[in-house]
């Protein structure tokens, strides 16, 4: 199927510069594949989170952030 797309020229050139042998068609195809893959990963993560919430296997956001901050501080103290 042939589809006409209006793509930002600067974005396209930047993508081509990252993959020197790429063509416009291959860049668009790669972008779509990556988009689909990331969206599938996001859907899976949401499902996993929803299942955990249904089981009651979640913690309060503030508690989680505090625990992560404690870990970060501990790593910083070990590094110094």
Image (cartoon, grey):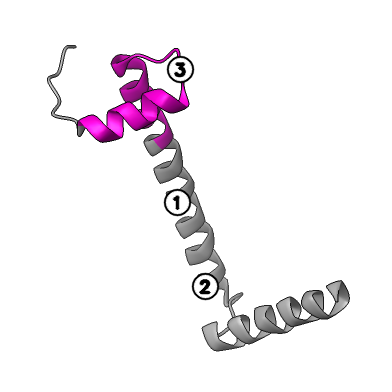
Neighbor class of circle 1 (other Cα within 10 Å; few <14, some 14-19, many 20+) is few
Residue 4 placement (x, y as % from top left): 12, 20
- The residue that label 3 is drawn on is 20
Residue 33 placement (x, y as % from top left): 40, 29
Distance CA(mark 3)–CA(mark 1)? 30 Å
Residue 34 placement (x, y as % from top left): 43, 34
The quadrant where residue 36 appears: top left
Q: Quadrant of the C terminus?
A: bottom right
Give the mark, 2 or 3, whose residue is nearer the N terminus: 3
- The residue that label 2 is drawn on is 53
Q: Residue at x 66, y 82 (%)?
A: 69
Region of the chain picked out in magenta, as a range: 9-34
Secondary structure beneath label 3: loop
Q: Is residue 70 depicted above or below 47 in this figure?
A: below
Dot label at residue 42: 1
Q: Of circles 3 and 1, which is in front?
A: 3
Q: Residue at x 51, y 71 (%)?
A: 54
């Amino acid at each position: 199927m042939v589809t006409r797309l209006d793509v930002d020229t600067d974005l396209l050139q930047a993508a081509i510069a990252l993959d020197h042998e790429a063509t416009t068609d291959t860049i668009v195809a790669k972008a779509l594949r990556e988009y689909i893959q990331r969206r599938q990963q996001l859907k899976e993560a949401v499902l996993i989170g929803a299942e955990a919430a249904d089981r009651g296997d979640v913690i309060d956001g503030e508690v989680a952030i505090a625990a992560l901050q404690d870990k970060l501080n501990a790593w910083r103290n070990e590094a110094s």
